[in-house]
Amino acid sequence: MVTRRRVLTQGLQVGAALALGGFAGRSLAQQTTPAHADEMTINSAPHARTGALLPATPTPTVLPKEAEAVRGENSLQAHASKHGLVAGTAVVVRALQHDPAMQQLIAEQYGVVVPGNELKWVALRPAQDQFNFTDSDALFEFAKTNHLLVRGHTLAWHNSVPDWLQKSPKELDVRKLLVDHIHTVAGRYSGRVHSWDVVNEAILPADGREDNLRKSFWFERIGPDYIDLAFRTAREADPHAKLTYNDYGVEYDNPDETARRTAILSLLRGMQKRNVPLDAVGIQSHIKAGSPSTIGKGLAEYIESVRQMGLEVYLTELDVNEDDLLFNDVAQRDKEIAKTYRDFLSVALANPAVKNVLTWGVSDRSTWLNDGPTHFRKQPNRPQRSLPFDDAYRPKETFFAMRDCIDARTV
Ligand code: XIL
């Protein structure tokens, strides 16, 4: 324990030192709104926080006894590793740097971290001729200090294109820019990344193309082969990382998501046919409590199809949006949210192709779902209880649901 605390303190010092560096280029105002927005995309578009949803209590300075009770062999990671899985979470580096208790919680509970924003274009590229690695370097340092793997997220995503690039003249060679970016970023961290979400959210059937590709910035400026190009370049830049295609909207049994699953599988098959290097498929896993659709056959068959293609499956961004729960009672909501985790994980973890499970955040103190417009509309004054730990870093029913589902895995 002494050693662990020392390591964490060192991590904090490194983080704090790096935090002094600037972070040009990543204000919400600078994030771009997509031309074609579906619900997920709207959720991930920029929105100012109202303040009403900020946590009411101060950040814990030490972990509560309830968190201590689930460390060591009781942790998510200890249970995961017994069942062929790695447990993980997204982190926001700047928040982590000022929160030693959260650093400790992450080090105790998880085996892999993914930077929530720090490796996106908007974060890394303040200008065409500039890179800012301050925060991403701090994240890698934190991971190293605490013996955590890192997932890289993401090299090409329609929703993180800096303003200067959106507004760039048509003559700008965007193909070369993407290739250079991937060489520089994936090259910098080569050998230190478990897996890269090379391309994120490239499919949008609603855009009406036969191949179902989203008419994103990258698509419009490079053409449909931007995906192959990104993966080939990523392999060159980091031959060790598992190259992943990551997307949302594949979890439910309903016509929309059936169409999305079919479209994604067809994209992946095409890539394999063209010998594009591809190792894994990410299922974002942003699911909803109280959804009228079920999770079952569609997801199970999708994961099995991916397995049959020889690819791994990662659950990359799990959380539960509880906007649709109309009752306010916390215990009742927590029960329903935990049940939603169970409904999803009992199906997803049944397939041996699934190798990890990451939530998009650790504690309800901070979830991107509080910033989404669906939330403003439906539950404007109710912070979401979407994650495994509560505001005071106590494990919730969701934590135990996750651990039970991990334990129930027999593959
Ligand atoms: C989100 C971040 O959590 C927010 O802080 C940011 O404002 C927008 O992006 N799918 C993804 C993630 O692949 O990158 C998104 O992260 C959430 C949806």
Image (cartoon, rainbow, N blue to C red):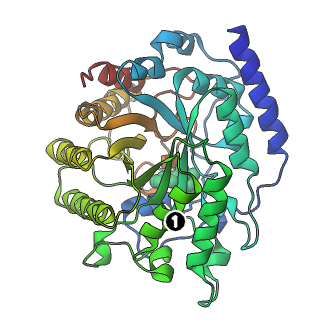
Whether residue 201 is visible: yes
- Given residues 339 and 88, the one toward you in this image is 88
Q: Is residue 24 left or right of residue 256?
A: right
- What x and y, as percent, mark residue 24? 76, 61
Q: Position of residue 258 (x, y in %)?
A: 19, 58
Does residue 156 sit above or below 239 in this rendering?
Answer: below
Q: Amino acid at mark 1?
A: Asn
| Residue 246 in which image quadrant | bottom left
Question: Height in image: 191 above or below 385?
Answer: below
Q: Residue at x 52, y 41 (%)?
A: 194
Q: Residue 73 in the image: x percent, y percent? A: 48, 10
Residue appearing at x 60%, y 76% in the figure: 176
Q: Which residue is mark 1?
A: 159
Please give left or right for residue 323 compared with residue 60 in the image: left
Q: Is residue 372 visible from the viewing direction of this image? A: no
Quadrant of the drawing holding the C terminus = top left
Front residue of 346 and 151:
151
Is ligand 1 less than 8 Å from the beta carbon at label 1?
Answer: yes
- At x 24%, y 57%, the residue is 261
Q: Name the image quarter holding the N terminus.
A: top right
